[in-house]
C-alpha cells in the first residue's frame, strides 16, 4: 500500500525545507523525483544513507526515483558545505567510481519494478555534447549573478576563495533538474539541506525556460548528540564497501551509538514502522544495558548493506570479545576482522620456524613474549587453569604447533576476559 511520502518523512524527522505545494503535487499521482550523487569515490559511505533512504521512501510511496550519478558534475566539484576546493577527477577514476556507486544503489532501490522502477541517470550523457558557448548562451543568461551570489554555498566561501568552476556548479545542477523535468517528467529534487540553494536554482531555471512544475524537499544534516560528526570514526569514513569498512566495524558503529542518537537513527535509517519503533524504544528504556535499540538498528542496517551472512559474521566477531566463544569461532574470522576485533591488543612477530618442533606454553607465555613476566608466573597461571590459547583453556603440558595457527598465521593467548596477546608467525 503506497504511503504519503511527505507524511512518512515528516514523522521520521527527515524534512528540513519543503517548497509550498510539494505534497499536493505528489499526491496527484505517480511522479518522478531525483537525488544526485557525485562519484568522488568508488563507494558511498553512511553519510549518503539519508539520501538513499529518502529515495527508498519515495519509491515505497509509489513514485519513480531517479538516482543521478554526477559523471559530469564529479569533474567540477560542489562548493556546498566545503571549506576548500576539492581535487577534480580524471575520466578513468570517475568511471570506476560511477560503477561502484551504481552497484551499491542497487542494494536499496528496485530497478525492476513494473509500476515505478528506479532509474539511474548520468548527467555526463547530456553534458558530453554541450559546448561551453552553448551552455552560457542557453542556460547562463537566465540566472543572474546577483541571484547566484545570494546563495549560502557561495557567500560562505567568498572570504576563503571560490573558483569560477565551483561558482558555476549551481547552474550545472540547475540544468540537471531542467533536463530531467523536460525528458523524465521529474517534478521534485530531493537532497540535504546544504543543497537547498542549488535545488531552487533548478526550479527557477525550469520556470524561466518555460518547463513544467518543479518542487524541492531537503532533509536535515545529521549530527550526533555529542557534537561529533555523523559517519566519522577515528579511522575516517564508515563506507558501504566491505573492503573499506568491514561488516564487523560497520555493525559496531551502529551498535556503539548513544541512546539519543539510536532513537533518531532507527527512524531515519530503517524501514520499521512507527508502532514497532515506539515499542523498541519502550523496551530499551526498561533495560538500557541490553542495548536493544542499538542492536535492532545495527541488525537492520547491516543486513540491508551486507546481507545475512556478513551480519552473522559481524555478530559472531562481536561475541568473541564480549561473550563465550571457541577456537572454531576465531578461525571463521577473516584476517581483517580478527585484527579489528582485537585492535590495540599487544602483538609480537616471530618466525614460523619457531613452531617446527613445537613450542611449550611456558615459552609462548613468557619465553618468547612478555605477556607474563616470568616462566614461574607462566607455570602458576597454567596450573590455576587461567590461561587460554585461541579461547580454549590449556595446561602446562600443551605443545603449540602450526595446526593451532588461525589463518595459518597467528595465535591468541589470554588470561581472564580482558588480558589478551597476539603472536604473529611469519615465514
Image (cartoon, rainbow, N blue to C red):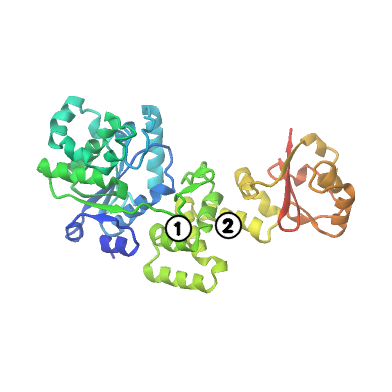
Say which residue label 2 marks: 315
- Residue nearest the observer in this picture, 374 or 336: 374
**Badge 2 element:** helix
Q: Position of residue 290 (x, y in %)?
A: 56, 67
Q: Position of residue 153 (x, y in %)?
A: 29, 41
- Residue 331 appears in the picture as rendered: yes
Q: In the rendered structure, which disc, 2 or 1, sits on the residue that comes first in sequence?
A: 1
- Residue 106 appears in the picture as rendered: no
Q: Is residue 188 left or right of residue 346?
A: left
Query: Which image quadrant for residue 132?
Result: top left
Identified at 71% across, 40% down, the residue is 409
Q: Position of residue 146 (x, y in %)?
A: 17, 38
Classify the position of the C terminus by image quarter: top right
As displayed, is residue 272 above or below residue 47?
A: below
How many residues crowd around disc 2 within 10 Å: few (fewer than 14), some, or many (20 or more)? some
**Badge 1 element:** loop
Identified at 55% across, 72% down, the residue is 287
- Residue nearest the observer in this picture, 253 or 106: 253
- Residue lying at the far front in this picture: please name it: 159
Q: Position of residue 218 (x, y in %)?
A: 28, 52
The CA span between labels 2 and 1 is 26 Å
How many residues crowd around disc 1 within 10 Å: few (fewer than 14), some, or many (20 or more)? some
Q: Is residue 222 left or right of residue 391?
A: left
Classify the position of the N terminus by image quarter: bottom left
As displayed, is residue 370 above or below residue 30?
A: above
Say which residue label 1 marks: 225
Amino acid at each position: 500500500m503506497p504511503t504519503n511520502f511527505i507524511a512518512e518523512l515528516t514523522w521520521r524527522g527527515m524534512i528540513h525545507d519543503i517548497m509550498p505545494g510539494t505534497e499536493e503535487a505528489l499526491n496527484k499521482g505517480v511522479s518522478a523525483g531525483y537525488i544526485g550523487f557525485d562519484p568522488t569515490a568508488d563507494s558511498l559511505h553512511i553519510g549518503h544513507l539519508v539520501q538513499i533512504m529518502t529515495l527508498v521512501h519515495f519509491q515505497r510511496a509509489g513514485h519513480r526515483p531517479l538516482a543521478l550519478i554526477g559523471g559530469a558534475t564529479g569533474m567540477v566539484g560542489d562548493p556546498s558545505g566545503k571549506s576548500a576546493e576539492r581535487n577534480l577527477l580524471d575520466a578513468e577514476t570517475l568511471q570506476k567510481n560511477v560503477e561502484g556507486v551504481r552497484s551499491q544503489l542497487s542494494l536499496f532501490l528496485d530497478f525492476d519494478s513494473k509500476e515505478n522502477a528506479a532509474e539511474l541517470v548520468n548527467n555526463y550523457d547530456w553534458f558530453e555534447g554541450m559546448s561551453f558557448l552553448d551552455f552560457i548562451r542557453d542556460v547562463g543568461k537566465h540566472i543572474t549573478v546577483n541571484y547566484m551570489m545570494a546563495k549560502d554555498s557561495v557567500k560562505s566561501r567568498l572570504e576563503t576563495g571560490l573558483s569560477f568552476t565551483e561558482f558555476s556548479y549551481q547552474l550545472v545542477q540547475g540544468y540537471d533538474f531542467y533536463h530531467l523535468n523536460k525528458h523524465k517528467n521529474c517534478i521534485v529534487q530531493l537532497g540535504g539541506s546544504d543543497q537547498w540553494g542549488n535545488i531552487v536554482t533548478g526550479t527557477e531555471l525550469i520556470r524561466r525556460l518555460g518547463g513544467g512544475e518543479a518542487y524541492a524537499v531537503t532533509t536535515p544534516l545529521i549530527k550526533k548528540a555529542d557534537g561529533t560528526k555523523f559517519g566519522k570514526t577515528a579511522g575516517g569514513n564508515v563506507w558501504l564497501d566491505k573492503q573499506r569498512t568491514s561488516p564487523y566495524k560497520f555493525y559496531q558503529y551502529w551498535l556503539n551509538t548513544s541512546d539519543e542518537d539510536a532513537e533518531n537513527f532507527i527512524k531515519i535509517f530503517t524501514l520499521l514502522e512507527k508502532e514497532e519503533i515506539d515499542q523498541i524504544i519502550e523496551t530499551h528504556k526498561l533495560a538500557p544495558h541490553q542495548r536493544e535499540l542499538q542492536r535492532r538498528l545495527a541488525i537492520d542496517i547491516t543486513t540491508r548493506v551486507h546481507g545475512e551472512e556478513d551480519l552473522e559474521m559481524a555478530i559472531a566477531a562481536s561475541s568473541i570479545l564480549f561473550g563465550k566463544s571457541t577456537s572454531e569461532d576465531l578461525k571463521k574470522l577473516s584476517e581483517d576482522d580478527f585484527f579489528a576485533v582485537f585492535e590495540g591488543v599487544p602483538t609480537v612477530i616471530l618466525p614460523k620456524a619457531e613452531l617446527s618442533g613445537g613450542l611449550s606454553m611456558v615459552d609462548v607465555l613468557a619465553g618468547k613474549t612478555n605477556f607474563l613476566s616470568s616462566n614461574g608466573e607462566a607455570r602458576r597461571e597454567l596450573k590455576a587453569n587461567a590461561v587460554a590459547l585461541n579461547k580454549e583453556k590449556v595446561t602446562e603440558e600443551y605443545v603449540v604447533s602450526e595446526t593451532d595457527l588461525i589463518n595459518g598465521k597467528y595465535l591468541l593467548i589470554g588470561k581472564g576476559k580482558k588480558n589478551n596477546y597476539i603472536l604473529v608467525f611469519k615465514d
